[in-house]
Image (cartoon, helix red, strand yellow):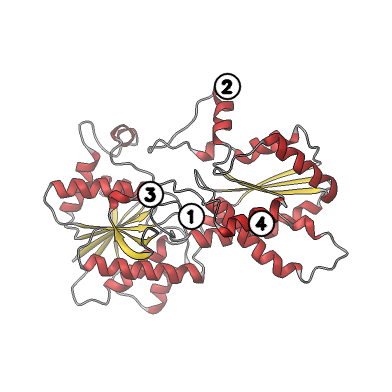
Amino acid sequence: MKIAFLTSGGNAPCLNSSIGRLLFHFSKIDDEVHAVGYLNGFSGLLKNNKINLPTKFSLNEINMFYSFGGSLIGNSRIKLTNVDDCLKKKLISDGQIPLEVAADQLINDKIDILFTIGGDDTNTTAKDLQNHINLKDINITVIGIPKTIDNDIFPIKRSLGAYTAASSGAMFFQNIVNENFMSEHHLIVHEVMGRNSGWLTGFTAKMYYDSLDEKKLYLHDTFDKRRYDIHGIYVPERELDINDEIDRLTSIMKEVKCLNLFICEGAFLNEISEDIKKSGESIQKDAFGHIKLDSINTAKWFSDAISKKINFNRILIQKSGYFARSASPSDDDLEYIFKICDFAFKNALESNSGIIGEDERTGELSCIDFNDIRGDKGLDINSKWFLNLIDRIEN
């Protein structure tokens, strides 16, 4: 039996752990197993750039996978149906079809099972690849592992690594918030990753407050505890009148002498895009047609907007994204990773292709058809935990 792995999209705290858990299971079966990792995702598959992965381990060697964040085999953002982008990146030659090249590579490598670990873009690409392989009447099992810190894959209830990213972002802000004592009128804008979903921003704020509540118990009343609060949170799913919000923030600034704001990098995307167009600049997009969010400084745009009406002595913009997404998994996340990968291993042996996860439509752990997968699920702003968070922040 020959198995292969590729990780794709952005970093997440579950990539190495998922590979390690699956390799652990395959090391225990009677069949002789060979494993390869395609380097830098679908890019490595197109270029036949791969390494052999170990299939026999000591306990320390297998635990190594769980203690490192990121991906030891590397990621990339490649869409196999975007021929022009693949040509531009020199992943194929003129006249080649990326799906054909990728499928042929798997066939030539005699791969029986391919694990794709990534978000909605990765797994919709895996869907395209599987459909293309099926047309060739070749039996290769393709198993998707749902990874995204945005937790935005439909119909996946919980993406691997998302909870760790939120707790890491909360820990990040626990340190940064202390900076607001450095001046009397201080603004801190904490930008959190997330394209069209504010889930990570919201859950990071929730986890920050969970930790803060414990610490606040021991903070003497001499000190103003409000300086540690979150005074505003901004996600793509909530409409906002900026002028009304500025009035609210102005009142807080007069009383507390600082503002701590959480903003999703995908918030105000329409407004920012309009400003970019008016300036005559072009909006950068990736192979999937998404706006490259690292080229849009959402936190700065918002801080500039409110600074026109609120006077700040110091403005501090801090982004927790790379810190949070590159963390090793928390104990809670690792337990969940094991749960998903154990079920993925079972389905792989049964030759069931699909993406593994808890299906929010049924509430059951399932092997979900790739064709059902969609991205940009969005934050449920009517969920109880989020409504409680908003009530605490704005009231």
Q: Are marks 1 and 4 in contact (CB under 8 Å)?
A: no
Q: Nearer the viewer, residue 104 or 187?
A: 187
The secondary element bearing badge 2 is classed as helix
Circle 4: residue type: Phe
Mark 2–mark 4 Cα distance, whole angstroms, equals: 34 Å
Q: Do we see residue 171 in this rendering?
A: no
Q: Looking at the picture, how far across and down is residue 127, in whole percent?
A: 27, 49
Q: Is residue 34 left or right of residue 267?
A: left
Q: Earlier in the sequence, mark 2 or mark 4?
A: 4
Q: Which mark is residue 333?
A: none
Count all numbered tags in the image, as a single digit: 4
Residue plotted at (39% across, 53% down): 74
Residue at the disc numbered 3: 120
* Mark carried by residue 173: 4
Marks 2,3: beta carbons within 8 A: no
Q: What is the spatial separation of the Cα atoms under label 1 and label 4, in whole angstroms? A: 17 Å
Callout 4: helix, strand or loop? helix
In the rendered image, the vertical position of residue 57 relative to residue 72, given as above or below = below
Residue type, label 3: Asp
Three-letter amino acid code at the position of disc 1? Ile
Nearest to N terminus: mark 1 or mark 4 = 1
Q: Residues within 10 Å of mark 3 (few under 14, many from 20)?
A: many
Q: Circle 3 — which element? A: helix
Q: Secondary structure at mark 1?
A: loop
Quadrant in which the N terminus is drawn: bottom left
- Taking the spot 36% from the left edge, 78% from the top edge, the residue there is 58
**Quick one: label 4, few (<14), some, or many (20+) residues within 10 Å?**
many
Instruction: Residue 59: give x, y in percent of width and height.
Output: 39, 79
